[in-house]
Image (cartoon, rainbow, N blue to C red):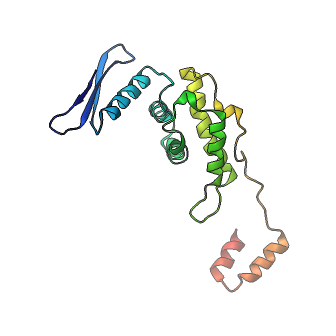
C-alpha cells in the first residue's frame, strides 16, 4: 500500500505508481489528506483514471476530457465550453461514477438547469440551454467513442432548449417613423438611427 501518515504534519500522503502510454514507469504523489480514507479514495480514483475504467467519477473523467480537448480547440471555444461545464454540469455530476449516470439523472439535471435564473431574475435563453445540454452530450459521446461506455444516457432524453433562436422582429416603416418622432429632440440618437 502506498498510503502513509506523515508524522511531522499528522496528515496522510499517497504515492501512486503507474505505467504511462509509452510503457515507462512513473510516479505521482499527493499530500495533505486529513484522513486515511480520503487518501485511499484519491489513490483509487487515480488507478481508475490511469486504467481508463469508467467506474471513475464524472469529475475525474472531465479532467481526461479536458486534457485531450483543450489543445484541439481554439482557446476562446475551449474557454466557453469549460465555463459551461464547470458552472452548469460539474456541480451536479462531479462525484457520480461515469457508468452509473442514467437518463433519469440527466432529466433531473435538465429540470434544475431550466429552473436556473440569471442575476436579473430572467430565465436563460432557449439557445443557451441547448448549448449547455450539448456540452454534457459531448462528454458522454467522447466516453462512448474512446472509453467504451456502453451508451450515452443523453440520447434517451429529449434535448432541452432550442437549436435556433426565434425569428427577429423588425419595425415596419410606420413604427420606425413613430420611433423617430419620439427621439426627434435627442439630436445624437436621431442622427444615429437615421444613419442606420
Q: Quadrant of residue 102?
A: top right
Looking at the picture, how far across and down is residue 173, in whole percent?
Answer: 83, 71
Residue found at the far top of this picture: 23
Q: How many numbered marks, from 0 up? A: 0
Q: What is the quadrant of the C terminus in the image?
A: bottom right
Residue found at the far bottom of this picture: 185
Looking at the picture, how far across and down is residue 89, in whole percent?
Answer: 55, 43
Looking at the picture, how far across and down is residue 44, in whole percent?
Answer: 39, 26
Residue shown at the point (69%, 78%) measured from the top left: 190
Q: Is residue 13 above or below residue 163?
A: above
Along the viewing direction, whichever of 156 and 85 lies nearer the viewer: 156
Q: Quadrant of residue 179?
A: bottom right
Looking at the picture, how far across and down is residue 2, in whole percent?
Answer: 27, 23
Q: Is residue 6 left or right of 49 when viewed as pictured?
A: left
Residue shown at the point (47%, 36%) measured from the top left: 59
Q: Is residue 123 above or below residue 36?
A: below
Q: What is the quadrant of the N terminus in the image?
A: top left
Residue shown at the point (53%, 46%) measured from the top left: 80
Residue shown at the point (78%, 62%) measured from the top left: 169
Amino acid at each position: 500500500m502506498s498510503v502513509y501518515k506523515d508524522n511531522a504534519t499528522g496528515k496522510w500522503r499517497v504515492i501512486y505508481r503507474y505505467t504511462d502510454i509509452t510503457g515507462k514507469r512513473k510516479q505521482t504523489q499527493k499530500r495533505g489528506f486529513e484522513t486515511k480514507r480520503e487518501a485511499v479514495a484519491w489513490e483509487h480514483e487515480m488507478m481508475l483514471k490511469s486504467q481508463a475504467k469508467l467506474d471513475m467519477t464524472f469529475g475525474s473523467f472531465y479532467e481526461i476530457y479536458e486534457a485531450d480537448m483543450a489543445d484541439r480547440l481554439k482557446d476562446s471555444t475551449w474557454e466557453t465550453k469549460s465555463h459551461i461545464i464547470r458552472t452548469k454540469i460539474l456541480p451536479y455530476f462531479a462525484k457520480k461514477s461515469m457508468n452509473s449516470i442514467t437518463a433519469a439523472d440527466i432529466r433531473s439535471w435538465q429540470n434544475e438547469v431550466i429552473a436556473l435564473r440569471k442575476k436579473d431574475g430572467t430565465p436563460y435563453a432557449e439557445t443557451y440551454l441547448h448549448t449547455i445540454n450539448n456540452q454534457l452530450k459531448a462528454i458522454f459521446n467522447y466516453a462512448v467513442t474512446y472509453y467504451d461506455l456502453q451508451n450515452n444516457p443523453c440520447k434517451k432524453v429529449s434535448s432541452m432548449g432550442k437549436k435556433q433562436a426565434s425569428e427577429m422582429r423588425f419595425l415596419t416603416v410606420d413604427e420606425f417613423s413613430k420611433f423617430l418622432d419620439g427621439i426627434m429632440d435627442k439630436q445624437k440618437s436621431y442622427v444615429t438611427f437615421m444613419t442606420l
